[in-house]
Image (cartoon, helix red, strand yellow):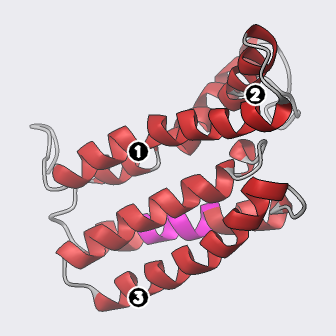
Amino acid sequence: FNLIDGLNGLCSGLSILAFIFFGLLAFVCDDAEILSTMALTVSCVLGFWLVNVTTGRIFLGDAGAYFLGHAAAWTAIVLASRYPIISPWALFLGLIYPISETLITIVRRRLAGNPISAPDNKHLHHLLYRWLLNGFGLSERLANGTTGCLIFLWSAVPATIAFYNYNYFFIFDN
């Protein structure tokens, strides 16, 4: 999640999406413990997100982004271990943007001969932000908000598909 913490509200907004997704899966599986934990987590992150996305005056930082990523990963692991009816592919799709961004970044940096831990601004959200800023002449604030909305939609579509097909297993799955 640290790699997607490049724009105001992006990491926290996608965290909210992931925790709502996990909460809905917990609801379907009648798991009150995970459902209440997800509701509490969404409430806390939502308060942060409202201030961060509108003003940009507070930041998650590395610790916040790592915490949200850690919480999302462990929630997915717990759901998969408690409920074999939930396909791991559904959980993967629920977290598709942070996972794909991480994998693409590792491959891109390796191919360029750079260390995988080297910072850069070539992530999808950075490229989309610059394209909206320079290509369409949007203000920084509008480009930031538009980028966040587009990435959110990019993530919400597979998460929605995953929710409605959470118990679908491929032929090669057990």
Q: Is residue 101 magenta?
A: no
Q: Is residue 127 left or right of residue 80?
A: right
Mark 1 closeness class: few <14, some 14–19, many ≥20 residues within 10 Å: many
Magenta-highlighted residues? 69-76
Where residue 119 sits in the image (x, y, percent)?
A: 88, 34
Q: Earlier in the sequence, mark 1 or mark 3?
A: 3
Circle 3 residue: 36
Where residue 86 sits in the image (x, y, percent)?
A: 21, 61
Residue type at mark 3: give it.
Ser
> Which numbered tag is attached to residue 126?
2
What is the chief secondary structure element of the magenta stretch?
A: helix
Q: Is residue 164 left or right of residue 13?
A: left
- Give above or below for 92 relative to 84: above
**Residue that appears at 50% across and 70% down:** 74
Circle 1 residue: 156
Numbered disc 1: secondary structure:
helix
Query: Is residue 147 or residue 86 the one in the foreground?
Result: 147
Mark 2 and mark 3: Cα distance apart in space: 34 Å
Mark 2 and mark 1: Cα distance apart in space: 19 Å
- Give above or below for 26 relative to 148: below
- Give above or below for 167 relative to 158: below
Residue type at mark 2: give it.
His
Residue type at mark 1: give it.
Ala
Residue 110 seen in this snapshot: no
Q: Earlier in the sequence, mark 2 or mark 3?
A: 3
